């Protein structure tokens, strides 16, 4: 049966050429015209037009030609691998070699101009030192000093001139035409532009005179600073079309071999102006030299450079490099075939797994990493079914945790006992799906209301189960009481029950308060819980702690404290999930910050205070993830 869609096939050269469009043909036409224009010198206008047309059509045409050629070349997997290795190995090497050559060209040129500039700066420093030495001589002996300096510097600086201005003026040589510098010309040394000529100069002032030393800065002088490098010039960046045209300039050194290329280096230097303009002007110091000439200067002019040996060494290294490249290409293609075979087997196995066939295995050959990869795939298929079972088990556990969380929410009190004197508000946020924090409140009698809070050691399911045990024991005790209920007796009995029915390492903090509405007295027992905060008239105080945690020791004894709650008093109970969360610097939020926050917001409603506390702790930690269960209970006296 004929397939509905023909599979792709390799294009022949004639088919590839027949698929070229009008854009590619235009490019070929314009490129041919450009060749004719250049060959027969048909004029600048024809050259410009044909060049513009060729450039305009080149990008699209080259892109389309490239696609056709690549489709023809990489049809076979072998050719695809060869092309891949050409791009992986050969192209980066060519690019690196080109980058190295270009970098060597510019760096060597700049190194040559650096050598010249360093020598020039040294000469300027010598000239400045001479001018300064003249000023250090007493005025009556300066004429003799400049004559001695002049005789010395005439050999180093052709047409050297020096001038001393004090009570009388001294000039060397006597026929020198050196003028006194304008007043606007600051003390300086370096390169000076006077008229259209450059000078190396130094101008120094002191209290008893000033010295000016100058010498013409010609191309011949610049080239003589390091004679073996080549011609050097100073001027505008694009002026005078090369250094050789300047009068007196040296010629570029002759090449030692075909690799001894000609280099050009340039550096921008600051030039002062004689005309009184205080602003500096920028000029370019340029040099033309050769690669090996710079290397001789750098490494030592005394070293015997055998250029034929260097050429032979380069050819040998290049040939050796080419041999290694060919070997690497052959080895790469061979290894790639083994890689593609393994990848194909894994592809087939993946399709089988997608179809639900977990019994499929890859045939392993060899003991290399590819074989290990195939073995890993086989182990993956073996473990995949087990992982699916684990995923289903996790889903079941998550569903059970959801049920446990819902059950725990049902354990907390659903309503607050009605009271004309005491308003109670509670809020909790579990760190996980279930919580180890506990709070409760009940009406014990027409005149007594109790409220409690606990914090079970740990988090998660085990803490939630212990919390349920604490709640059931506490509620059983208060529901079966008759007559007066003593807080310390309730906590003592709760401690014994927890110790008898839980593991030794399981314990809980616990606070129980009983409020008498007739006397406004709060009787309480604090079993190792964080001291509640009492806000009265804008001041804060902490309630007492009456014993250790419950469930740890059977012999623990607990006391009972009492306090009269005055109108507007606010009592805050909280767990360590409020005071102990840490910020990025491992600093806890702390009891002091909590007290200040509650004092500041005591005028708000109970819900407003709770929201302020929760938001402050969240900002302190800088994370939405809770570090521990957070529970707050506010009892406010009306």
Image (cartoon, rainbow, N blue to C red):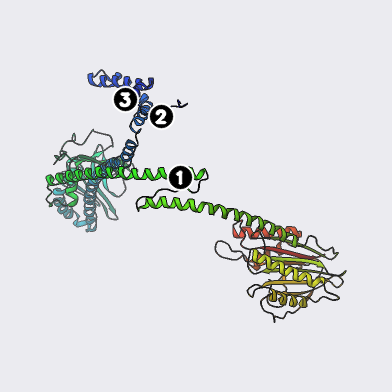
Seen at 30% across and 22% down, the residue is: 31
In the rendered image, residue 347, in percent from the top left (x then y), is placed at 44, 43
Is residue 27 shown above or below 409? above
In the rendered image, residue 509, in percent from the top left (x then y), is placed at 68, 72
Q: Circles 1 and 3: CB distance less than 8 Å? A: no
Seen at 28% across and 37% down, the residue is: 237
Q: CA distance from mark 2 to mark 1?
A: 25 Å
**Within-10-Å neighbours for mark 1: few <14, some 14–19, many 20+:** many
Say which element carries label 3.
helix
Is residue 362 shown above or below 66? below
Q: Earlier in the sequence, mark 1 or mark 3?
A: 3
**Within-10-Å neighbours for mark 2: few <14, some 14–19, many 20+:** few
**Mark seen at residue 349:** 1
Q: CA distance from mark 3 to mark 2?
A: 16 Å
In the rendered image, residue 494, in percent from the top left (x then y), is placed at 74, 75
Asked whether the viewer can see residue 179, the reply is no
From the viewer's perspective, is the residue at label 3 or at label 2 nearer? 2
Residue nearest the viewer, comparing 119 with 345: 345
Apparent side of residue 552 relative to residue 568 in the rendered image (left or right)? left
Q: Earlier in the sequence, mark 3 or mark 2?
A: 2
Apparent side of residue 59 relative to residue 134 in the rendered image (left or right)? right
**Mark seen at residue 8:** 2
Residue nearest the viewer, comparing 548 with 468: 468
Q: CA distance from mark 1 to mark 3?
A: 38 Å
Q: Circles 3 and 2: CB distance less than 8 Å? A: no
Is residue 519 shown above or below 119? below
From the viewer's perspective, is the residue at label 1 or at label 3 nearer? 1
Q: Quadrant of the C terminus?
A: bottom right
Apparent side of residue 366 relative to residue 234 in the rendered image (left or right)? right
Seen at 76% across and 66% down, the residue is: 440
The residue labelled by disc 3 is 13
Say which element carries label 2.
loop
């Amino acid at each position: 049966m004929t397939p509905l869609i023909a599979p792709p096939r390799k294009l022949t050269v004639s088919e590839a050429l027949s698929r070229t469009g009008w854009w590619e043909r235009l490019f070929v036409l314009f490129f041919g015209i450009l060749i004719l224009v250049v060959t027969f010198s048909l004029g600048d206008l024809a050259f410009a037009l044909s060049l513009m047309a060729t450039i305009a059509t080149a990008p699209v045409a080259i892109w389309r030609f490239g696609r056709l050629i690549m489709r023809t070349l990489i049809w076979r997997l072998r050719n695809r691998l060869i092309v891949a290795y050409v791009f992986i190995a050969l192209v980066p090497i060519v690019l690196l070699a080109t980058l190295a050559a270009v970098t060597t060209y510019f760096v060597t040129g700049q190194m040559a101009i650096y050598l010249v500039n360093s020598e020039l700066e040294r000469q300027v420093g010598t000239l400045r030192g001479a001018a300064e030495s003249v000023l250090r001589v007493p005025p009556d002996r300066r004429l003799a000093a400049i004559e001695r300096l002049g005789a010395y510097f005439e050999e180093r600086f052709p047409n050297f001139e020096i001038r001393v201005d004090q009570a009388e003026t001294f000039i060397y040589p006597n026929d020198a035409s050196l003028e006194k510098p304008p007043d606007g010309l600051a003390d300086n040394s370096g390169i000076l532009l006077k008229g259209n000529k450059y000078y190396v100069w130094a101008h120094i002032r002191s209290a008893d005179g000033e010295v000016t030393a100058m010498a013409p800065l010609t191309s011949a002088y610049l080239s003589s600073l390091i004679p073996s490098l080549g011609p050097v010039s100073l001027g505008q960046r694009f002026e005078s079309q090369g250094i050789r045209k300047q009068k007196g300039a040296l010629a570029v050194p002759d090449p030692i071999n075909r690799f001894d290329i000609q280099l050009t280096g340039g550096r921008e230097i600051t030039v002062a102006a004689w005309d009184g303009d205080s602003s500096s002007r920028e000029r370019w110091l340029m040099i033309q030299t050769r690669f090996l000439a710079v290397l001789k200067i750098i490494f030592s002019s005394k070293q015997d450079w055998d250029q034929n040996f260097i050429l032979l060494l380069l050819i040998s290294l290049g040939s050796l490099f080419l041999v290694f490249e060919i070997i690497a290409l052959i080895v790469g293609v061979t290894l790639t075939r083994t890689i593609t075979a393994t990848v194909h087997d894994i592809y087939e196995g993946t399709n089988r797994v997608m179809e639900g066939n977990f019994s499929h295995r890859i045939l392993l050959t060899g003991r290399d990493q590819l074989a290990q990869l195939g073995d890993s795939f086989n182990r993956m298929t073996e473990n995949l079914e087990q992982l699916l079972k684990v995923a289903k088990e996790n889903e079941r556990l998550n569903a059970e945790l959801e049920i446990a969380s819902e059950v725990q929410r049902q354990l907390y009190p659903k309503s607050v006992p009605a009271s004309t004197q005491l308003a109670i508000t509670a809020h909790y946020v579990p760190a996980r799906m279930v919580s180890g924090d506990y709070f409760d409140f009940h009406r014990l009698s027409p005149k007594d209301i109790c409220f409690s809070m606990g914090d079970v050691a740990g988090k998660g399911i085990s803490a939630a189960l212990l919390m349920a045990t604490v709640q059931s024991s506490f509620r059983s005790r208060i529901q079966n009481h008759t007559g007066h209920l003593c807080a310390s007796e309730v906590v003592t009995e709760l401690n014994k029950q927890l110790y008898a029915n839980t593991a030794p390492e399981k314990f809980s903090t616990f606070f129980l308060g009983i409020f008498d509405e007739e006397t406004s007295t709060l009787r309480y027992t604090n079993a190792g819980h964080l001291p509640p905060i009492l806000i009265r008239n804008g001041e804060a105080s902490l309630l007492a702690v009456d014993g250790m945690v419950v469930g740890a020791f059977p012999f623990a004894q607990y006391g009972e404290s009492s306090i009269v709650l005055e109108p507007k008093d606010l009592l805050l109970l909280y767990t360590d999930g409020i005071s102990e969360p840490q910020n990025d610097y491992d600093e806890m939020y702390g009891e002091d910050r909590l007290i200040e926050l509650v004092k500041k917001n005591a005028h708000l409603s109970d819900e407003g205070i709770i929201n302020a506390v929760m938001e402050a702790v969240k900002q302190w930690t800088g994370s939405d993830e809770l570090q521990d269960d957070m529970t707050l209970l506010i009892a406010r006296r009306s």
